[in-house]
Image (tube, rainbow, N blue to C red):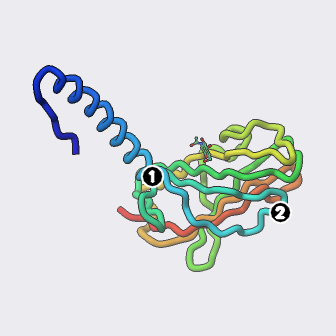
Amino acid sequence: MCRKARAGSKGLTWTMDFRVVCVFCLALLLGLSHSEQVKFADCGSTVGAVTMVEVTPCPNQPCQLHKGQSYAVNVTFNSLVDSQTSKAVVHGVIAGVPVPFSIPIDDGCKSGIQCPIQAQKSYSYVNQLPVKPEYPSIRLVVEWELRDDSSKDLFCIKFPVQIVA
Ligand SMILES: *[C@@H]1O[C@H](CO)[C@@H](O)[C@H](O)[C@H]1NC(C)=O
């Protein structure tokens, strides 16, 4: 990919320029393969509308979650209401049964959202999904909610994942 072209005195500058371009392309490629817009289902966002869900890294879907690693989840949504607070609730749905999934920070206002939340504004909720080494190697559905002051869902999204060693 990054072949050196050397011919005379002009060759050196050409090599330098080419290198800069190569580094830039590589960075772009890595960036693209790391952050992935995932297909999600809405599970009842009553006071918000989700526009995009990103999981990083997730080069292939369903996202493969490696034990002991942590994944960034970025949910972009429009709020339909004003809210002072926001609280995240995460479940792993295993064979149809929702099991509470603990996340280190459940305060949405400390996860990329500037509170108070205002109606008709767009927000990006960004948090980490830690995958503990003791989790079983199974496929499951991650269900992620963000609740407003009156416990209504600013968003509720779900997407399939596979936990791997
Ligand atoms: C989250 O996604 C939005 C929309 O693509 C983007 O503008 C924002 O920079 C992302 N935030 C992070 C921390 O990745």
Could you tell whether 78 is left or right of 106 in the image?
right
**What's the residue type where badge 2 is placed?**
Thr
Q: Which residue appears farthest toward the top when viewing the image?
A: 9
Regarding mark 1 in the picture, which secondary structure is present there?
loop
Packing grade of label 2 (10 A; few <14, some 14-19, many >=20) is some
Task: Measuring from the top left, give residue 15's x and y in whole percent.
Answer: 21, 29
The residue lying at 17 percent from left, 40 percent from top is: 3
User: Quarter for ligand 1?
Assistant: top right
Q: Which residue is mark 1?
A: 57
- Return the residue nearer the eye: 38 or 18: 18
The residue lying at 53 percent from left, 48 percent from top is: 72
Quick one: quadrant of the C terminus? bottom left
Regarding mark 2 in the picture, which secondary structure is present there?
loop
Residue behind label 2 places its C-beta within 8 angstroms of ligand 1: no
Could you tell whether 9 is left or right of 122 in the image?
left
Could you tell whether 41 is left or right of 36 in the image?
right
The residue lying at 23 percent from left, 28 percent from top is: 14
The image shows residue 22, relative to residue 52, as above or below, that is above
- Return the residue nearer the eye: 150 or 135: 150
Q: Which residue is mark 2?
A: 46
Task: Measuring from the top left, give residue 118's x and y in whole percent.
Answer: 85, 42
Looking at the rendering, which quadrant does residue 153 occupy? bottom right
The image shows residue 81, relative to residue 140, as above or below, that is above
Answer whether labels 1 and 2 touch (C-beta < 8 Å).
no
The residue lying at 65 percent from left, 69 percent from top is: 41
**What's the residue type where badge 1 is placed?**
Pro
Q: Which residue appears farthest toward the bottom when viewing the image?
A: 95
